[in-house]
Image: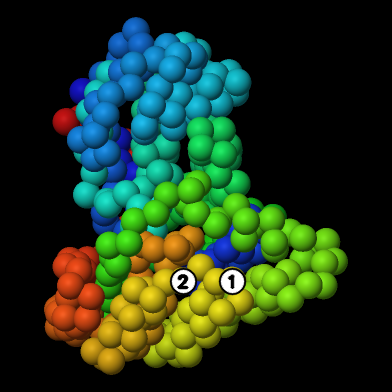
């Protein structure tokens, strides 16, 4: 039995820029999705998180529901790239919550893609495989997503963030200071990007880039341009080993997502404020917004206390329980030793 793992991610800065060919700075984390599988005549996968079963032909033909739509679309994309019809049967497990803004759908697609390619002896360059996974997500649920999530899931290196130009696909690894800790706090507000204003925001931004001058389009373009500049500022700070300098950069990014792109929520705003009040160096919402999580940056030795303070404060204010994750910057998707 073979085992494949793909990580989730938090994006330090560069939100809603990937589909416009902008800059992003994501980090793969040590939470993700694992697939244990064996060769089979069909693609038959069971999952406990999210629960479900998919049973389709190796070329992606069939009718699938739930997470199976992603697998079906992925198999079809790989078939079009020349993958021979080899199936797999296995079990999917995850310690990455769906709908929390941590790229769970990309982790699913990347892990299954590695397994399907391995079963068929198909070798694709990482960014070619990332593009296939991105197209599969759009094919499955109609989400006009960029390539950030799939790319970092495949290209990440431990202890680094990935600077990616989503227009040219040029990329490099940016070392993270050893003293920098990552705290991910889930608001508990669930959303599926396909059912939110995600596509509308992209349409508004693209309209602005084509020259529209209405107030909404101008705000969306202002966010894109200022966010690209913030990615460059954040990379300069990390290259200089100055993690504290990320504080005002992430603060400006969160304000732009809240005010110019209008994808934050009161819960995310509250979590950011709680993290900063508890001593985090920097904090902002991460992911597509409309719910999901925040990322807070803090000294490694202070992360546990900050996480506890944020959880307590959030529960007092909202009645919602949350279990912050103290994450490590992890490596990309891979085949592990046989299970």
Alpha-carbon span between mark 2 and mark 1:
8 Å
Residue at the spot 83% in from the left edge and 61% down from the top edge: 210
Q: Residues within 10 Å of mark 1 (few under 14, many from 20)?
A: many
- Report x, y in % for residue 163: 54, 65
Badges 2 and 1: C-beta atoms under 8 Å apart?
no
Dot 1: element: loop
User: In this image, 86 relative to 185: left or right?
Assistant: right
- Report x, y in % for residue 303: 20, 79
Nearest the viewer among 318 and 248 is: 318
Determine if residue 312 is in view: yes
Question: What is the quadrant of the N terminus in the image?
Answer: top left
Determine if residue 21 is in view: no
Residue at the spot 32% in from the left edge and 62% down from the top edge: 189
Nearest the viewer among 46 and 8 is: 46
- Can you tell which quarter of the image residue 198 is in? bottom right
Dot 2: element: loop
Relative vertical location of residue 68 with respect to residue 279 in this rendering, above or below? above
Residue lying furthest top: 41
User: In this image, 323 relative to 273: left or right?
Assistant: left
Residue linked to disc 1: 261
Residue linked to disc 2: 264
């Amino acid at each position: 039995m073979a085992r494949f793992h793909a990580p989730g991610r938090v994006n330090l800065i560069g939100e809603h820029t990937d589909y416009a060919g902008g800059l992003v700075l994501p980090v793969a984390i040590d939470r993700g999705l694992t697939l244990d599988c064996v060769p089979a005549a069909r693609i038959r996968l069971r999952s406990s998180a999210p629960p479900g079963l998919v049973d389709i032909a190796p070329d992606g033909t069939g009718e699938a529901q739930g997470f199976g739509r992603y697998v079906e679309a992925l198999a079809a994309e790989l078939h079009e790239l020349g993958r021979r019809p080899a199936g797999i049967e296995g079990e999917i497990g995850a310690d990455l919550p769906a709908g929390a803004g941590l790229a769970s759908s990309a982790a699913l697609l990347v892990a299954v893609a590695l397994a399907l390619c391995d079963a068929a002896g198909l070798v694709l360059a990482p960014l070619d495989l990332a593009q296939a996974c991105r197209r599969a997500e759009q094919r499955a649920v109609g989400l006009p997503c960029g390539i950030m999530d799939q790319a970092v899931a495949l290209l990440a290196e431990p202890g680094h963030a990935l600077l990616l130009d989503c227009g040219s696909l040029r990329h490099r690894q940016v070392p993270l200071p050893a003293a920098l800790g990552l705290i991910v706090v889930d608001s508990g507000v669930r959303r599926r990007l396909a059912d939110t204003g995600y596509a509308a925001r992209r349409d508004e931004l693209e309209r602005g880039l084509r020259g529209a001058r209405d107030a909404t389009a101008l705000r969306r373009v202002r966010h894109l341009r200022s966010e690209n500049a913030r990615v460059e500022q954040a990379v300069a700070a990390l290259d200089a080993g100055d993690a504290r300098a990320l504080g005002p950069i992430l603060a400006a990014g969160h304000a732009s997502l809240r005010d110019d792109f209008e994808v934050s929520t009161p819960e995310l705003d509250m979590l950011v404020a709680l993290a900063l009040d508890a001593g985090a160096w920097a904090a902002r919402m991460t992911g597509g917004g409309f719910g999901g999580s925040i990322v807070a940056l803090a000294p490694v030795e202070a992360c546990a206390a900050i996480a506890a303070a944020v959880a307590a404060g959030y529960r007092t204010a909202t009645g919602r329980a949350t279990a912050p994750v103290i994450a490590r910057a992890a490596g990309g998707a891979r085949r592990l030793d046989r299970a």
